[in-house]
Amino acid sequence: MTIAKFMRTFTTMGRRVVRDYKRVGHRTAVTSTRTGSLASQSLGDSVRTEFPVGREVSGFVVRGVDDVDELHLTAVRLEHMATGADYLHVARDDPNNVFCVGFRTTPMDSTGVPHILEHTVLCGSNKYPCRDPFFKMLNRSLSTFMNAMTGSDFTIYPFSTQHSGDFRNLMSVYLDAVFKPKLSELDFLQEGWRLEHQDVHDKSSPLVFKGVVFNEMKGVFADSQRLFMQKLQNGLLPSHTYGVVSGGDPSAILNLTWEQLRHFHAYHYHPSNAHIFTYGDQPLSGHLEFINDNYLSEYKRIDAQTEVPEEPTWSEQRTDHVQCGVDPLAGGEGQSTVAVAYKLTNIIDSFENFVLQILSELLMNGPNSPFYKSLLEPQLGSGFSPSAGYDGHTRNTTFTVGLQGVQAEDVSKVTDTIQNTLWKVASEGFPEDRVEAVLHTLELGIKHQTSSFGLAVAIAITPIWNLDGDPVEALKINKKIRKFRECLSENPRYLQEKVKQYFLENNHCYTLTMAPNPGYEEQLQAAERDLLAQRVSALSEDDQARIWNLGHTLAEKQEEEEDLSCLPTLSVSDISRTVKPTHIMDIQVAGGVELQLCHPPTNGLTYFKALLDTQHVPGHLRPLVPLLCGVLTRMGAGDMDFRQLDQEAELVSGGLSATPHTAPHPYQAGHYSQGVLLTSHCLNQNFSRLLDLWSRIFTEVRLNDLGRFKTLVSMIATDLSNSLVYSGHRYAMVSAAASTSDMAALAEEWGGLTWLRQMRSISETKDLSQTLSQLRELSELLLTCQGMRIAINTTSDNHDTAVHTLEDFLSGLNTAPANPASNSASVHANFTPHTSKTHHVFPFPVNFAAKSFPGVPYLHPDAGALRVLPRLMFHFLHREIREKGGAYGGGASLSPGGPFCFFSYRDPHSTQTLSTFDAAIEWVLSGEFTERDVKEAKLGTFQSIDAPISPGAQGSRRFLSSITDDHFSDHRCMVLDAAPQDLVTVARKHLSLAHIQGTCLIGPQNKDTEQDGFWHIVQG
């Protein structure tokens, strides 16, 4: 991953590391990190005193203790003496504690055995024999994150929580799952694959392939991006485990047996092959005692022999070509993809890979990078290829550069340009200020505190730790920066020589091209039909009888009412009815602008947010608001062209961002705010320079460069198209909700399929001068002080300086829009909520279904019970959609003040799932749930309500949504006080008897929707 991506692992979930084989479970955005340096120092001192090197404690021996000052943490490395299990504890003054147990899993075929095993171990264990305790714990916990992930050579099981009792509960469930799973045949059939009658109750119905992972991976490889990434890795590193599909190729999955799964577990899920990670402010001694006494003490050391060797270096470069489906959102031409990938060095060489990350950032990131200039600006393609950049998750790290959206005749031009660009860089090097900008971004990222820091650390270190590298050394960023600067000082051609070594003189180079085949999906479907026919024809009578019996047994098991008393749980009484107030100051500054000022411990950073009101924007310009956001900070301003602006932004800030924003009013139904949200952060001393950049954008943004604009439009359109298969459920929910309210309609226009299609249409327009002219008109309306609100989070000692700097900034801005609101009309002024049913037809092998109902304001009397309802429905929907239906996931959601939505993800069913949504409502109305179910649903609900908040985000609830601490307190009490009958009442009132509802299906052609005259069919 690039330097930027490396630092984003301290805010995100490490997308490149864990690929796409994530278990759909709880992915709540994790928040808040307390990093008071004095508190962290005190915690570190006590840890070093208690755990000196060589001390033996609870079956472990301390191998090393190390401080990482720049991250305010102390790392303790231990080894379990009997088994050799590797343990890393990161002590940090952070209440959001993290646990993760991981294993090196090295499949040698594409049956997906580690991925299916990841699912199956979470389906019941010795101590917790109920069906799927992992999902049951989602409503019995206050976790801030729960999941499991399969990578190319590892499987990890992380969670985080702020509650000490919850931590012990979840650690017990996770450890019992991985070390003592039931691994029953029925669970394998449900999660992996099975032959079963289409109608499990009708013996005459045809046999079909079913299974959660089977359907999941069909959905994964319906995305040509995912297909290309997988084929690229397989081709570049073919000799060992990276030459297969760890997540499972759908056709190969059908070759996996239950016995093979059990053998893989016995061999790979042993403590001798395990890495255990804990993080936070809880005592290490308790963790060690529990893990040893309850699990590791039962094992003896084995030689797991799961090592991954280095890839043998090639003597000659290689090429290959693959086919994919046609992109229905792209034009008829320019759908080829080409990439050149290089094998680099061993992942355990921490510094060398750090240098390669910097080199990747310099080569590819931003408009000043050589490949951006040589590949994107000439518009040889619509965007960089999948896997572009540095990738550090395999034994040999890799670097990839290429393009997607390429004309077939330009493929060789792209590869020639890549080679020529590398020769030019090797000759000319990089400007010194570019290197400084990259290093500044890295150093700023170290100071930037995030809410999911511990979880991000666990995921970020997994690849190197999994392959026997030093995870603590990998965290010492400042040490690497110092050494890097020394190398540059001693040898000014240091980076140029790296380009020559790893790219120009490297024969381990793999070029992959991909082009669409109009019959690709039909060929896949035909191959699956043929394989099914072969399997069915080979069945004996005994085989058929066994399939019938197993199908019935599985169906009966899925319907069983279980005794969940074995599972640990928290109580609703563990949730506080009071809230800790956020100390906020409200100030009116120059131009009548309202300033919200907050002083959390920001570690020397200033966070800036500004909201620009779009209520006065006329209808013909409103659809272009998200496009303006996409280009506003990337076109240049004043005397800075876009390259200079980007360079200065990197030197003084963590980036400049603009995004569309909508928020419902907390208590007035139908009222909402809309606008553009500007965000950025910087070191306190750089705040003046940061606001100078925003001032230039406000007063002199350069919306006149057609060439630059066309490049950005193409990139934005490509990114949106690529997101559809991965985020289909989100698009389905947004589309379904669009008919239910004015705000939801605007949200769909600014971020749904309407926006996606509009951007694709704009990108295919030959002359963009009219669009650019409209953006200039829109910018003149928005970039003023009129209607602006600002929020600043900074340290208390920087208060006066920040306010004075802001006053200077505001004094230079326009004070009134060019076109006053009284002369404007909203595009949704005459919007009337209505019922809709829309089928967006795309050539996917799976579906994304959604149904939406109007919600209620945040402080509506029904808001508390309505917010608990999705969590109450979870187990019903999980059983029906995932366990029985074989979809990757499904459920219900309610954003505060927003619509109530049902959804399914990578679903083999379509309209049947819509009926399941209705059945969930009827299940609630029947009252077939207990008071315990309601209490557990409240626990699940408070995982998001009480998610911790990072210093830079404190006060955001009030600033963005007008929700005060009093509002927040009242809302949480309504959730806590919701009685079982209240849930029945709101389900009847707002769902069953709702006059308005929206339905959306995204997926292949469907006879049910075609024959039902109420459906609106939209092709592609």
Image: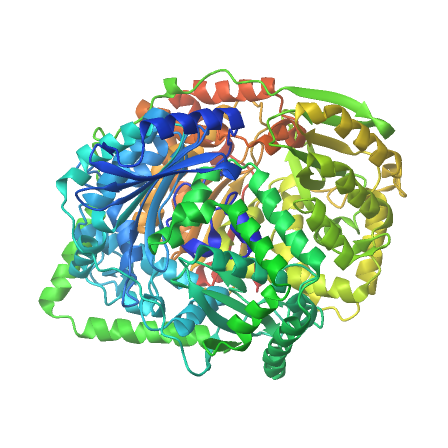
Decide if residue 930 is on the left or right side of residue 1015: left
Return the residue found at the far front: 490
Q: Give the camera-side residue of 583 and 667.
A: 583
Is the residue 580 above or below the residue 277 in the image?
above
Tag count in the figure? 0
Between 623 and 122, the residue placed more toward the observer is 122
Residue situated furthest left in the rendering: 542
Which residue is located at x 39 percent, y 29 percent? Answer: 142
* Spot occupied by residue 705 in the image (x, y as percentages of width and height): 82, 63
**Which quadrant, please, contains the C terminus?**
bottom right
Q: Is residue 843 among what the camera can see?
A: no
- Residue at left 35%, top 70%? 243
Quarter residue 126 falls in: top left
Residue 315 percent across, percent down from the top left:
42, 82
52 or 371, nearer to the observer: 52
Q: In the image, is 720 to the left or to the right of 617?
A: left
- Using the image, determine if residue 256 lies above or below residue 475: below
The answer to whether residue 353 of the structure is visible from this angle is yes
The residue positioned farthest toward the top in the image shown: 578
x, y percent for residue 446: 56, 42
Q: Position of residue 626 (x, y in %)?
A: 70, 50
Looking at the image, which is closer to me, 705 or 99?
99
Relative placement, left or right, of 665 versus 197 is right
Residue 808 position by quadrant: top right
